[in-house]
Image (tube, rainbow, N blue to C red):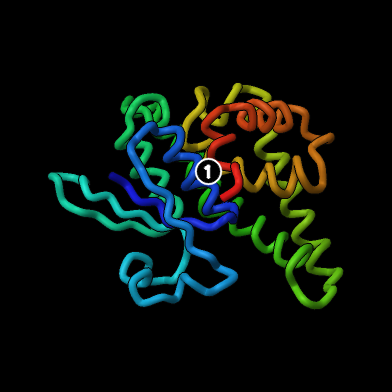
Amino acid sequence: MIDIYFWLTDNGRKALQIIEESGLPHRRRPVDLTKKEQFQPEYLKISPGHKIPAMVDDEGPGGARITLCESGAILKYVAEKAGGALYPAEPTRRAAVEQWLFYGSSTFTPLAQQYGLFMHRFPEDVPQAKKHYAEIVRDCFGVLDAQLAKNAYLAGDFSVADISCYPDVHMHGAKGMGLGDYPNLARWDAAIEARPATQRAWASL
């Protein structure tokens, strides 16, 4: 059984989406960031950096219990364990998936989070920061849109690469600034939103 520790953030949604898509037995363990539950001593044993998501798999490699934090690591672990198209074994296809998995985890999401901070959560109005990060997010949308002009999904078939990028596109694009300038990205967003696993992952607590 896999326990997924999450909250309703972009990275938290990634963990929920991958576990729902995987079909693996799991339990949801909400960690309420508004109550600072991520700083509880027991949670820090799982996620030393007091971040969500985190994961515990009682049936890890060799039957050993494994704990993981960092959304990219969780996406890769669960997708690889599930097998199939989510994380293909063939080396060339896997390399394509990993390129966009890491683009989402290490480039796009951190920048989109700064956009969200200054647009929605920062206590002061900082127009320069808003303009700066809005331009960066639009540039990322353009990168994704160009890739999706050539493929139905980021690495060909639907995979963990798409889950890595979807929450921030959906939150800041489809439900935010709009995707009218990015028709391929809009088509992709709608296709992923319609997936049953996505709907389960984005359901209320």
Residue extending furthest front?
205
Residue 37, above or below 5:
below
Helix, strand or loop for disc 1:
helix
Residue extending furthest left?
62
Quadrant (top left/top right/bottom left/bottom right) for the N terminus:
top left
Name the residue at 66% across, 55% down: 112
Residue at image mark 1: 164
Amino acid identity at mark 1: Ser
Q: Position of residue 28 (x, y in %)?
A: 43, 50
Horizontally, residue 8 falls left or right of residue 157, namely right
Comparing 36 with 89, the one in front is 36
Q: Position of residue 81 (x, y in %)?
A: 30, 37
Report the number of discs: 1
Comparing 96 with 104, the one in front is 104
Binning the other alpha carbons within 10 Å of mark 1 as few (below 14), some (14 to 19) or many (20 upward) gives many
Name the residue at 32% across, 29% down: 83
Residue 192, above or below 47:
above
Name the residue at 18% across, 45% down: 61
Q: Where is residue 71 in the image (x, y as percent from the top left)?
A: 45, 53
Comparing 23 with 67, the one in front is 23
Horizontally, residue 128 falls left or right of residue 96, namely right
Q: Where is residue 18 in the image (x, y as percent from the top left)?
A: 45, 39
Name the residue at 32% across, 47% down: 2
Residue 49 in which image quadrant: bottom left
